[in-house]
């Protein structure tokens, strides 16, 4: 590594950017507590690796650089292993989420297809129910009308029977009176009494 001040500034900026990205990744993994815990456990190793890299860049002797390189190599292997584990866990979660999304899409499609298939049947059933209700209502109205007509017919028959029963004795009495008048006007004075 060059000990150029610009290179050191770039190294420090990249180190700070890597720390920021790791912290940001922890906040992005809020929905996956296992992966967030794995990443939090990896943060000290990542920081150690960045510090070892800075020590190597700032080393004054080749001995210090070699020690920093050894630390860096050990940390690099453990950080890489942790990150690979995290990557595989995230890959599995992503595959599960994609499968769940596919299943949800298939269920929605099946529901929409069932709606398309059964909508005409439900429409026909609705029309049949409306017509059945209309016919039932008309039947009730006709039955009510028929009962009204029957009542009127019974009332007419009753009125005719009453008229007959009342007019029959009156006619008989009128006939008797007519017969008596004829007898009285044609006959003997004795018959008149």
Image (cartoon, helix red, strand yellow):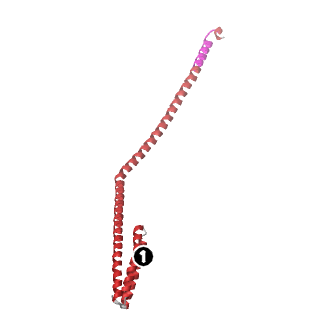
Q: Quadrant of the C terminus?
A: top right
What x and y, as percent, mark residue 26? Answer: 42, 73
When the figure is inspected, residue 66 is found, relative to residue 186, above or below; the finding is below
Image: magenta residue range: 171-188
Q: Is residue 101 left or right of residue 149?
A: left
Give the residue displayed 40% in from the left and 81% down from the top: 17
Q: Most extreme residue toward the right, as rendered?
A: 193
Give the residue displayed 36% in from the left and 56% down from the top: 111
Mark 1 neighbour density, 10 Å: few (under 14) some (14–19) many (20 or more): some
Give the residue displayed 42% in from the left and 76% down from the top: 23
Give the residue displayed 34% in from the left and 78% down from the top: 74
Q: Can residue 32 be seen here? A: no
When the figure is inspected, residue 60 is found, relative to residue 26, above or below; the finding is below
Which quarter of the picture shows residue 91? bottom left
What x and y, as percent, mark residue 89? Answer: 35, 68
Which quarter of the picture shows residue 188? top right
Nearer to the camera, 101 or 88: 88
* Magenta-drawn stretch, dominant element (helix, strand or loop): helix
Considering the numbered disc 1 on the image, is that residue within a helix, a strand or a loop? helix
Please give the residue where the numbered disc 1 appears in the rendered image: 23
Residue 180 painted magenta: yes
Residue 51 painted magenta: no
Q: Most extreme residue toward the front, as rendered?
A: 63
When the figure is inspected, residue 185 is found, relative to residue 100, above or below; the finding is above
């Amino acid at each position: 590594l060059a000990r150029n001040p610009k290179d050191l500034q770039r190294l420090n900026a990249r180190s700070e950017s890597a720390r920021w990205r790791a912290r940001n990744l922890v906040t992005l993994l809020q929905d996956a507590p296992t992966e967030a815990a794995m990443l939090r456990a990896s943060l000290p190793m990542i920081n150690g690796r960045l510090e070892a890299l800075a020590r190597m860049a700032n080393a004054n002797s080749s001995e210090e650089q070699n020690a920093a390189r050894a630390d860096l190599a050990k940390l690099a292997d453990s950080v890489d292993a942790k990150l690979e584990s995290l990557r595989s866990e995230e890959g599995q979660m992503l595959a599960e989420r994609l499968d769940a999304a596919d299943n949800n899409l298939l269920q929605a499609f099946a529901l929409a297809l069932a709606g398309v298939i059964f909508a005409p049947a439900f429409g026909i059933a609705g029309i049949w129910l409306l017509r059945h209700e209309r016919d039932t209502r008309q039947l009730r109205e006709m039955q009510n009308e028929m009962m009204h007509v029957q009542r009127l017919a019974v009332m007419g028959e009753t009125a005719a029977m009453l008229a007959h029963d009342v007019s029959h004795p009156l006619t008989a009495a009128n006939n008797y009176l007519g017969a008596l008048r004829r007898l009285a006007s044609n006959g003997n004075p004795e018959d008149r009494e």
